[in-house]
Image (spheres, rainbow, N blue to C red):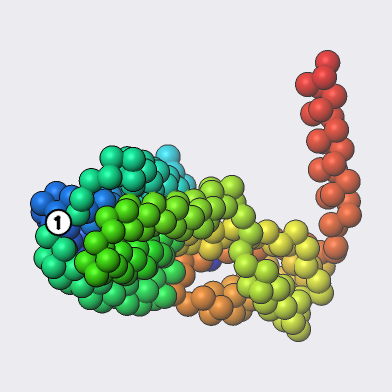
Amino acid sequence: MNEQIPEQMSAQKKATVVSSTVATLLLIVKLAIGIASGSVAVLASAIDSLLDMAISLFNFFAIKKSEEKPNEAYQYGKGKIQAIAAVIEGTVITVSGLYIIYVAIEKLIAGSETSLLTPSILAMLFSIVVTYLLVQYLMKIAKKTDSIVIKADALHYKTDLWSNAAVLLSLGLVYFTGIDSIDALFGLGIGVYIIYSAYEIIEEGIAILLDRALDGDIVAQIGEIISNHPEVTSYHWLKTRTDGSTNFVEFHMVLRPNMLLLEAHRIADEVEDRIMSLEAGKRWVITPHFDPYDDEEMNDALLHGKALETVEKVAE
């Protein structure tokens, strides 16, 4: 088994600290303006910033936990906690979207007015600039670390950027037309958009928790690397998965029956080094198995036979 552990984790933690700080700043500005003006769209954006702050803090502790080294109790590490964090983040975003929809409908029914439009517009302009800079930073860190938590954070703040632009547009329309229902209608649309954006985050987190294989292109390249080695006769039972920060690969490769173990180990090291170069920024755990001949069909038959035997025992 070969492992590669890049030194990149501090960048992830730093990103969550930056996003938490920015979210706190935006929360203070939006909440003050939203309460004072009575704007549903601004208040909805403030609630979203509150959730941003809470989620970014949660992500910090999730990343910190996921960086802990494997031990006797957790022999594969705790990387999947990032996927759990992504599912929780997506769920919280969905709930916030539902609440925004509720507040928007309530304003449409009550017909309340929006005041302090100029300060509200200035606050949203400030929010857009700050959020844009944060999104660029998070996308850079996400590309560097390939962390699902940072990807989720970047996606979340990207939706914030669009929702802030929508809030700004709604305030502008209310300012020029005097029709307060526009604010509520935009708030309603923002709520729906937020819920839609959360789906991708939840889906990715669940896929990792269910041990989905690596992307098809990566799996195909791994297969090519193994089969193209001049001393590997063939391979089978290639299995892959990821926990968000670590890629796990296992496979059986067929070598000459009379090969020395030292030679087999050298070949495995060469194959593993080439596989790890596919995503150098990732941590890899690669487990090869040496076969003197291709026993895939026999193993499949044995596995199937054991499965039938287990089913029969349960039925009894």
Q: Is residue 286 visible?
A: yes
**Quarter residue 296 falls in:** bottom right
Numbered disc 1: secondary structure: loop
**Quarter residue 169 falls in:** bottom left
Identity, as a three-letter code, of the amino acid under mark 1 = Ser
Image location of residue 82, percent across then percent down: 41, 53
**Residue sitting nearer the eye, 314 or 127:** 127
Please tell me whether residue 314 is drawn above or below residue 77 in the rendered image: above
Q: Is residue 266 visible?
A: no
Q: Would residue 177 be found to the left or right of residue 33 on screen?
A: right
Image location of residue 174, percent across then percent down: 26, 63
Please tell me whether residue 16 is drawn above or below residue 305 in the rendered image: below
**Residue sitting nearer the eye, 151 or 108:** 108
Question: Crowding at label 1, few (<14), some or many (≥20) Cα neighbours within 10 Å?
Answer: some
Image location of residue 13, percent across then percent down: 26, 62
**Residue sitting nearer the eye, 137 or 109:** 109
**Residue sitting nearer the eye, 280 or 193:** 193
Instruction: Please name the residue shown 85% across and 64% down the image.
Output: 293
Viewport quadrant of the N terminus? bottom right
> Residue lying furthest top in this view?
316
Viewport quadrant of the C terminus? top right
- Where is mark 1, residue-wise? 115
Instruction: Please name the residue shown 21% across and 59% down the image.
Output: 23
Instruction: Please name the residue shown 28% across and 40% down the image.
Output: 110
